[in-house]
Image (cartoon, rainbow, N blue to C red):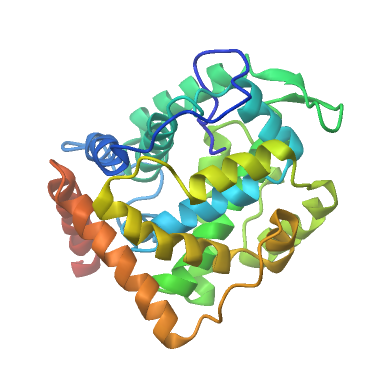
Amino acid sequence: MAADSYADVPGSLSGSLSGSFSGLVERSAAAYASSVPEHPADDGFFGPGSVTWRLTTDLSGPISGLRSLMIQALHPLAMAGVDQHSDWRSDPVGRLAATGSYTTTVSVGDKATAERVSARVRRIHEHVRGVDAVTGRPYAAGDPALLLWVHAALVDSTIVAAQLFGTPLSAADADRYVAEMVAAAELVGVPAAMVPDSAAALDRYLESVRPELRCTPAARESMAYLLDPPGLDPDVAEIWQDIRAGTIAALPGWARDMYGYEMPEPLTGARRTEIRQALGVLDAVFLGEPGVLEARQRLTLRMRAVRAT
């Protein structure tokens, strides 16, 4: 459901979910390591002093990613595009890795590379069209209104997840992050004038779209699959239960109601610590994959250099 979640291969893959999540960490790590440039031509659209860069290394990333997918899926037209045109059902790990690679490249890559991958996504979107079987409405993946929904869900989820399970943003930094991310929306084809540029504007936008939302069978099925994925490596499967719980707890109440989830256990200080510890363990596993630690160090060094000036 993120900007490049539509597959290169057309055609519907509705039906039983057959893909395995085996190799999730390994493939996601490889995509991440290859997306952080070793010798960037410039500082990209945000730069090492940005809130965007800071959030790329926040431990809450897995929960923000899952939460954003769950929010995005509640727009029936966005979900129909994924359901009818995406190969994620047969290769969910590949699609998640590709989405992660895209967001990392746009966030910390140089401008030319970010523009190149965004242009590729826009070309894919040109061919993703159809009719939603649930509402009977036509959709086009390149529709700025749909792209804006995807964008807003990601930005909002990043802020909420950091607040609950990572390093919370101040009100000023939350506004700054939302404003920074206008550039990311423009890269995939959303006019800047349409994009919320403050946390308050983002909240108003999300509230305005709520009447259009519904939990379609495809949304319910696919999100249940993400929260309880088959084939996870044994050392990740146990950690995933805490991440699943954190994701459901991070959802707004109206979204939990749409999916039919019960009210989660209270997010006490002890429970938040447990979930943060699970995220820390997952991050340690991630950093142990080839090239990831080096990529993280490159970003950290560039951010420290900016703070030192």
Residue at 62 percent of width and 56 percent of height = 197
301 left or right of 18 in image: left
Q: Indicate the position of residue 246 as horizontal and vertical percent values.
A: 48, 66
Residue 74, percent from left and from top: 70, 46
Q: Quadrant of the N terminus?
A: top right
Q: Nearer the viewer, residue 69 or 4?
A: 69
Q: Eyeballing the image, is 109 above or below 275? A: above
The answer to whether residue 110 is above or below residue 261 is above
- Kindly identify the residue that appears in the image at 23 percent across and 51 percent down: 286
List x then y, in percent, for residue 291. 14, 41
Quarter of the rendering containing residue 271: bottom left
Q: Which quarter of the picture shows residue 266?
A: bottom right
Q: Residue at x 47, y 20 (%)?
A: 120
The residue sitting at 58% across, 59% down in the picture is 156
Q: Is residue 152 left or right of residue 272?
A: right
Q: Can see residue 169?
A: no
Residue pushed farthest bottom? 269
Depth check: give the residue in front, 150 or 264: 264
Q: Position of residue 119 (x, y in %)?
A: 48, 22
Q: Is residue 293 left or right of residue 257?
A: left
Residue 8 in the image: above or below residue 83: above
